[in-house]
Image (cartoon, helix red, strand yellow):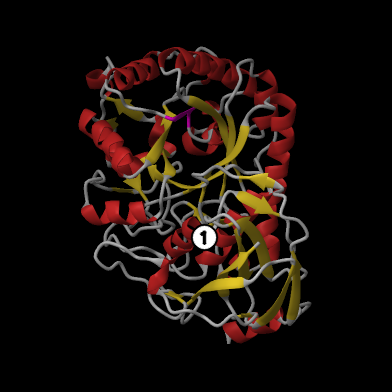
């Protein structure tokens, strides 16, 4: 009954036949070669509090402690290699509560619940990055939970870790200070929230430290959290991005932000719950673009040389929504945000998370890829760095176009969020070469098909040529994600 209601809703204001025009092969923007990137949460890496098995939250964290992640698992490396080169961000809520092995106060600060980043973990992380062509983005500890300390942040802990890494030839490609510092009020209590002025002062100290101790590293900030519908949430407590950037004296390389379009049932505050209806609603996709435009204006005004990155994103806050974030329905928002983010100028999109939680690309316990993994895999194979301007006249069918990996070709990404098939007429494109279509038996299916076949690794590899060829008809299947390849 639910699906029949959903279909009736989707029949309103829809076109059976769509037209897409490629008016120019001059790109409107370009993306980083590592555009589709991902995170490993510090809680998963170092064995902190995490979401699996948790029914609620404790100050932004799950309630269950997990063992440290073993990065030497052969299957994990195989799956990561399948996604191609990327940035891997190590951050998350416990990034401000972790003790580094280089800290002079390591033993005296330890508590029963302390999260410790050991020397072995740090070396294992860098080895993992090196063998899988990953560039490391690391969230450094801010950790000033007492307001009277803020504005006088001391760089000693960060400096020691940076110096150790330099001595051992370990690259930290991107450094950022603190995790979602505009949401300290939610994670650590109202009295811990830094003011924009004090935060800018501490960030200036941080930037100078990184420039001195790790001169090849870039610096990102402020990594502010934006909520669906309400943005930076409580004014004037947490809407600090604009004043922070205005107070900042040192230059940033990257202005980044965090965004989840939905909230899971674990979340204590829900401005847009993760439901099938919300995930497949075109209006749910628009907040991302609105907040991105806000950040772009601030970047242009205060940090015009900095790139704009989505530094953390996933389907639903607080670990993702069970039986939705790890199912086929999640593919629709993910495919759209990849396409939309590239089109509006985001240079990098960092997915939370690579492994761990309902929103993971890879299931932590089984090491099986979730449906969003295969969207990511096809994107990496078929979508190039140049972004072209195309539009859809049906809100339930989102369309994006990039250059292909091979010169002289382009790829059209078509996301049909409706229960109806569509006929798509393409003008300005060359000959159609190949089609790849992701479908599933149901929206809540854990398994997807590419061109009707379940993807599998054979002899450690999965290739585009593994999948049957589809006809070159202009038909777009109901509830499908499509990559159509053309000559230009």
Residue in the picture at 56% in, 30% down: 221
Q: Nearer the viewer, residue 393 or 206?
A: 393
- In reply to whether residue 46 is colored magenta, the answer given is no
- In reply to whether residue 174 is colored magenta, the answer given is yes
Q: Is residue 384 above or below residue 322?
A: above
Query: What percent of the width, then of the height, locates residue 5?
Result: 64, 83
Residue 423: quarter of image: bottom right
Q: Is residue 462 above or below residue 105?
A: below
Q: Which residue is mark 1?
A: 382
Q: Where's the C terminus, which quadrant?
A: bottom right
Q: Main secondary structure of the magenta part?
A: strand
Residue in the picture at 25% in, 43% down: 68
Q: Nearer the viewer, residue 232 or 113?
A: 232
Q: Nearer the viewer, residue 317 or 404?
A: 404
Query: What percent of the width, then of the height, locates residue 87?
Result: 44, 41
Please state if 28 lies on the left or on the right of 361 as rendered.
right
Query: What percent of the width, then of the height, locates residue 271?
Result: 63, 54
Q: Nearer the viewer, residue 127 or 22?
A: 22
Please state if 1 lies on the left or on the right of 154 as rendered.
right
Label 1: element kind: helix
Q: Residues within 10 Å of mark 1 (few under 14, many from 20)?
A: many
Query: What percent of the width, then of the height, locates residue 470?
Result: 51, 80
- Tell me, yes or no, if residue 128 can be seen here: yes
Task: Tell me the magenta residue range.
Answer: 173-178
């Amino acid at each position: 009954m639910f699906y029949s209601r959903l279909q009736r809703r989707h029949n309103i204001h829809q076109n059976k036949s769509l037209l897409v025009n490629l008016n120019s092969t001059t790109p409107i923007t370009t993306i980083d070669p590592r555009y589709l990137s991902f995170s490993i949460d510090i809680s998963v890496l170092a064995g902190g509090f995490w979401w699996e098995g948790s029914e609620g939250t404790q100050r932004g964290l799950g309630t269950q402690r997990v063992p440290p992640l073993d990065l030497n698992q052969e299957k994990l490396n195989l799956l990561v290699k399948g996604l191609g080169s990327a940035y891997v961000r190590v951050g998350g809520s416990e990034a401000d509560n972790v003790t580094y092995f280089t800290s002079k106060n390591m033993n005296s600060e330890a508590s029963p619940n302390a999260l410790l980043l050991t020397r072995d973990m740090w070396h294992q992380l860098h080895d993992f990055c090196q063998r899988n062509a990953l560039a490391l983005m690391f969230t450094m500890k801010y950790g000033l939970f007492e307001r009277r300390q803020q504005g006088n942040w001391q760089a000693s802990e960060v400096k020691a870790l940076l110096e150790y890494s330099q001595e051992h030839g370990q690259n930290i490609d991107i450094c950022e200070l603190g995790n979602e510092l505009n949401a300290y009020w939610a994670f650590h209590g109202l009295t811990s929230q830094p003011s924009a002025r004090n935060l800018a002062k501490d960030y200036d100290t941080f930037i100078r430290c990184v420039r001195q101790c790790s001169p090849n590293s870039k610096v990102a900030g402020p990594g502010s959290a934006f909520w669906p519908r309400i943005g930076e949430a409580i004014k004037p407590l947490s809407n600090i991005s604009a004043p922070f950037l205005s107070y900042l004296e040192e230059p940033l390389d990257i202005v980044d932000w965090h965004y989840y379009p939905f909230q899971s049932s674990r979340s204590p505050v829900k401005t847009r719950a993760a439901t099938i209806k919300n995930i497949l609603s075109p209006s749910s996709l628009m907040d991302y673009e609105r907040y991105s435009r806000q950040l772009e204006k601030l970047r242009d005004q205060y940090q015009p040389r900095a790139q704009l990155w989505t530094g953390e994103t996933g389907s639903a806050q607080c670990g993702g929504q069970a039986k939705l974030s790890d199912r086929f329905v999640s593919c629709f928002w993910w495919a759209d945000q990849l396409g939309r983010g590239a089109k509006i100028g985001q240079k990098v999109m960092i997915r939370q998370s690579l492994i761990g939680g309902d929103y993971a690309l890879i299931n932590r316990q089984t090491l099986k890829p979730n449906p969003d993994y295969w969207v990511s895999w096809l994107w990496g194979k078929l979508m190039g760095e140049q972004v072209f301007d195309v539009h859809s006249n049906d809100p339930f069918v989102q369309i994006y176009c990039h250059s292909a990996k091979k010169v002289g070709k382009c790829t059209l990404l078509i996301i049909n969020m409706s229960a109806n098939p569509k006929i798509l007429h393409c003008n300005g494109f060359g000959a159609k070469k190949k089609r790849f279509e992701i479908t599933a038996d149901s929206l809540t299916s854990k398994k997807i098909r590419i061109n009707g076949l379940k993807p599998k690794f054979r002899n450690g590899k999965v290739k585009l040529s593994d999948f049957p060829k589809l006809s070159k008809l202009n038909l777009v299947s109901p509830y499908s994600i499509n990559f159509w390849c053309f000559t230009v």
